[in-house]
Image (cartoon, grey):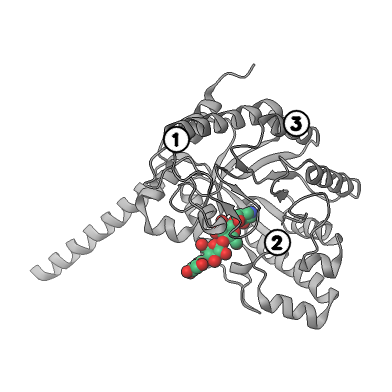
Amino acid sequence: MQSTYIFLLFLFLISICANCNIARESTPIAQGLKDYADFPIGNSISIRKIIEDEKYRTMIKQNFNSITSGNDMKMYTIGREEGKYNWEKADETLAFCERNNQRIFGHTLVWHLGLPKWIQNNGKEHGADWVDEYLETYITKVVSRYKGKVAAWDVVNEAFETAGGNYRETFWYQYLGKEYIAKAFRYAHAADPEAELFYNDFNIERDTAKFLGVLKMIEELKSEGVPITGLGFQMHLRMDIPDEVIAYTLKKAGETGLKIHFSELDIIFNRHDDTKDGGEQVYKELTKEMEQAQAEKYKNLVLMYRKYIPKNQQYGITFWGCNDRDTWIKRFFGIEDWPTVFDENLNPKRAYYGFMEGLKEKIR
Ligand code: G3I
């Protein structure tokens, strides 16, 4: 009898502990970047790291009210096997965001990178009709599953060449021509008419030819009634990109009337040529002066966003990775750098406070 009581008590204590964990998990933590902004502040996450690393998880909850999945909602994750949809990581990401009252930004439905081999093979074997059918099926499945939950999608990512105003000849382009872009937006809209639908690209804040190419595409899409509602500037910035150039672009972007999202913000010091392992290690260590200059760059960027993008078009600013330890920059460009607002130990850098000042300062 006594052992039954002990067993029941044990079960009771376990259930209390479990509830404590859930309560702790879902209690919003105040006083992070999000609390100083009147638009969403986001970051990209990996759900595995969120689950495994408590310090990282706490920092994400404290600072960000919008979440983009870094890789877990890409086609190479969800659609990596033929005839099967792999929802696990995307579902876990959504559950985490829902518990913490964070907006979910879907990234990305259509991209040329990391396209699963089986899709490429089927394209070769069955041609354009199959590709179009798959595009529609994939977008419809994914967007409807998360209808009303994912607030916005990067529907098409990086459809333009790295430099200049020409379309990139991707898998999708080769089979469907540039029409794949309009089709993707239409399929996404049909699956969730309330979701905001973005075109997302890099270097458009600095490469005027590329930016004008994107603007022309947006005009064409709008004139054909394609349901595009947002433009994402990835904003993988470098310290030497002049603020004047960024300001010019942002003013013009505001005039489109689209929602504007800084979707993948980081600011690196060293140079690169935009290709894998194409980094040039100019700076070998981070000095106090460099840190200060980076803080000012972050601050100015926020001020420009607030000044040049009309209030009702400010969809938010999202960082791409939140610390100098895990940043994609080092792996991709093959260099050491310090592009984010948290250091390798997840402590806020000067850049963090620079960004915060940009949120707090009065705009003239
Ligand atoms: O998960 C595997 C791991 O098991 C393996 O040991 C390791 C070895 O390389 O690779 C790991 O996967 C890598 C994955 O990132 C997770 O770290 C892939 O190789 C790597 O290709 C993948 O890179 C991602 C890249 O997109 C390609 O999808 C980056 O993390 C991600 O930050 C980057 O994000 C893109 C945006 O989607 C679009 N804009 C540019 C941005 C930066 O490239």
Give yes or no for contact between labels 3 and 2 (Cβ–Cβ under 8 Å). Answer: no
State the image coordinates of residue 270 (x, y, percent, origin top left): 56, 45
Q: Is residue 90 visible?
A: no
Residues at marks 3 and 2, CA–CA distance in whole angstroms: 28 Å
Q: Label 2, secondary structure: give it.
A: loop
Q: Nearer the viewer, residue 241 or 95?
A: 241
State the image coordinates of residue 312 (x, y, percent, origin top left): 70, 32
| Tag shown at residue 111 | 2
State the image coordinates of residue 173 (x, y, percent, origin top left): 82, 64
Q: Quadrant of residue 145?
A: bottom right
Q: Which residue is mark 3?
A: 248
Q: Is residue 98 left or right of residue 219?
A: left
In the rendered structure, which amino acid carries the disc numbered 3? Tyr
In the rendered structure, which amino acid carries the disc numbered 2? Trp
Q: Is residue 311 left or right of residue 16?
A: right
Name the outermost residue toward the top. 364
Residues at marks 3 and 1, CA–CA distance in whole angstroms: 30 Å
Q: Residue at x 64, y 43 (%)?
A: 235
Q: Label 3, secondary structure: give it.
A: helix
Q: Is residue 111 left or right of residue 6?
A: right
Vertical position of residue 355 compared to residue 130: above or below: above
Q: Residues within 10 Å of mark 2 (few under 14, many from 20)?
A: many
| Tag shown at residue 32 | 1
Upstream in sequence: badge 3 or badge 2: 2
Q: Is residue 101 visible?
A: yes
Q: Residues within 10 Å of mark 1 (few under 14, many from 20)?
A: some
In the rendered structure, which amino acid carries the disc numbered 1? Gly
